[in-house]
Image: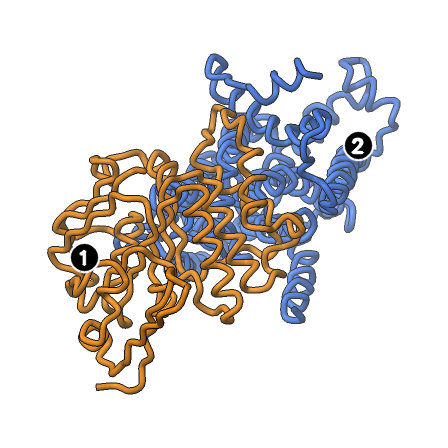
Chain colours: A orange, B blue
Amino acid sequence: MDAIKIESLKIAYNGKTVIKDLNLDFDTIGITSIIGPNGSGKSTILKAIGRLIKLSGGCVYLDGKDIHSLPAKAVARKMAILPQGPKSPDDITVKDLVAYGRFPYRSMIRNSDPEGNDIIEWAINVTELRELTNRYVNTLSGGERQRAWIAMALAQKTGVLLLDEPTTFLDIHHQLEVLELLERLHEQEKITIIMVIHDINHAARFSRRIIAIKDGRIVKDDIPANVITEEVIKEVFGIKARIISLNDECNCFNTFCVPYGVL
Amino acid sequence: MSILRRRLEGGYCADYSLPYACFNNYCNSLWGDAVREDAGMMPLHEHDHRYLKRVVTAVAGLSILVLGFIVSIKFGAVDISLKEIVSALTGDKSSANYHIIWNIRLPRIITGALVGINLAISGAILQGVLRNPIADPGIIGVSAGAGLVAVIIMILFPGHTAYVPLGAFLGAMLASMIVYSISWRGGISPLGLILAGVAVASFLGAFLTTLMVFHSDKVQGVINWMAGGLQGRSWGHMQMILPYTAIGSAVSLAIHRHLNILMLGDDIARGLGIRVEMTRLGLIALAAFLAASAVSVAGLLGFVGLIIPHAVRLIVGSDYKYLLPFSAVFGAMLIIWADTAARMAFAPTEIPVGVFMAFLGAPFFLYLLRRGMKK
């Protein structure tokens, strides 16, 4: 994969510093979740990696190169980002939307994307949108729509996929459906996934690594078992929670966080 | 077929000149689908009901355009027979109406068509860049700037009316630059640009009105120009606007993918590798050039840039691959027909084509608004 490295990152909005001196490394394939309360700067970090916002200081490296010095399209061929709650025009079909993911491979004077159509087909199949190919995106259900946007990001054929709260506004069934899709993409297609997510238990269930953020700094950055503890949850979210461990055959997931009150 | 397919899909045409390569690439993107079907691959238009609609609309649009062209040559102060039109167009100078066709009607029709193309493409670009379905060239200050400078020349320097087109063009460009720069705050927000455009337009409009009040004895020609018209347009006007039409439409077709992706929002566009601010500036500048060149030869024509792209979007969808060429065809068509009607309706008095189009345009706009409200 293409390693991502953040060095002494600083972000300020309207003169107010949100992130200061943040260092992070993503160098192994895996699913990483970033958790934290509202306004903690977790989405800001994701946007900084995805070069959606201007940095006030520091640097983001992709494969050892400063992301802002690389051509924009070259970055888009290595790293895809799906912002929160994207909106499409009324009359765009699933197929149209997924095809837009090939934009970084096209140029104004060359039609040099021979494998484009095969990749679009692959992205539609892997997100199970085959039957919905010609439906307008706006007529889809929330879960289907989110899968269509993920398919667009997949059509970029990148090694890294960044997602900002991919399960917001979805019911629990569709939340799990989207997360299982991401898990499958990681396992089968070896895509590195970095996502911002609200649900602590979903983070624990689906990620190999969790980064807990508060007030723009990292509180804990470790495997789920070491992040989902009463102390860390208390410090990050300011809540009282019980951590329950189950000893059954399911070795993939046996730690639950049950919040029961604020501090 | 495999040769054709290689030709279409492997089209690496860096060795051609740029406009040709852009056009060739654009054609490949239009016809590539048919080739795929032929090769037994997944057809992109499978059950896509829009495909038929687009073909029918293209055929209908082009037919009405050609018909409008013929009708517009035929009817006027002198009616000319079809036989005479054919012989004059094929170069037979002996025909009595040769002069009327070649020196009066033809330049007027072609200039009108180019004005329509420019305004329609300009409106289509702005509606996408500003993500606002009722954006038109007036919104970036083009009409207000062109109007003010043209009126200043006509009223204060009546000996220099030959400079009206150039002045209108410069005024339009200057006004849109002012609108763009006062709405810049580390970036452009579409809403901010629209608000700045409204403010600048009313500010310049106030100057214009003041000028007309103080020189109310001289406003006769001014009113005609401001209503927009094609009366007496010659080959010289056509030459003035043609380069803008040619370059503007080639460039806009070449970047139709950028327009599609800007419609998905700034963050998605950045993620896909677009430099959003630079692209937006380039597109707004392109729209300003197209609209400024149109108003410089035809005066302040309203509604074409608003209605045509909006209506075309309702029919063929918002994919710019189709929206741009269809807007061009329908823009040309509307102006040719409206100009013919404006000449004929109260003959021998001509009403300015802009007035005529506003008569048609306003009800249509209300219809669109009501339709939008029902949704």
From the viewer's perspective, is A20 left or right of A245?
left
Residue A137 percent coordinates (x, y): 59, 56
Q: Nearer the viewer, residue B145 or B365?
A: B365
Instruction: Look at the numbered disc 1 and give the secondary structure of its residue.
Output: strand
The answer to which image quadrant residue A65 occupies is top left
Q: Amino acid at mark 2?
A: Ile
Q: Residues within 10 Å of mark 2 (few under 14, many from 20)?
A: some
Question: How far apart are the alpha carbons under marks 1 and 2?
Answer: 63 Å
Q: Residue at x 64, y 28 (%)?
A: B32
Residue B86 percent coordinates (x, y): 83, 21
Residue B143 percent coordinates (x, y): 48, 50
Q: Using the image, determine if residue A232 lies above or below residue B347.
A: below
Q: Using the image, determine if residue A104 lies above or below residue B207.
A: above
Q: Nearer the viewer, residue B243 or B251?
A: B251
Look at the image and tell me in which quarter the N terminus of chain A lies: top left
From the viewer's perspective, is A233 left or right of B8?
left
Q: Answer yes or no: do the residues labelled 1 and 2 have beta carbons within 8 Å?
A: no
Q: Amino acid at mark 1?
A: Ile
Q: Which residue is mark 1?
A: A11
Look at the image and tell me in which quarter the C terminus of chain A lies: bottom left
Q: Which residue is mark 2?
A: B70
Q: Residues within 10 Å of mark 1 (few under 14, many from 20)?
A: many
Q: Chain of mark 2?
A: B
Q: Nearer the viewer, residue B60 or B346?
A: B60
Q: Is residue A9 visible?
A: yes
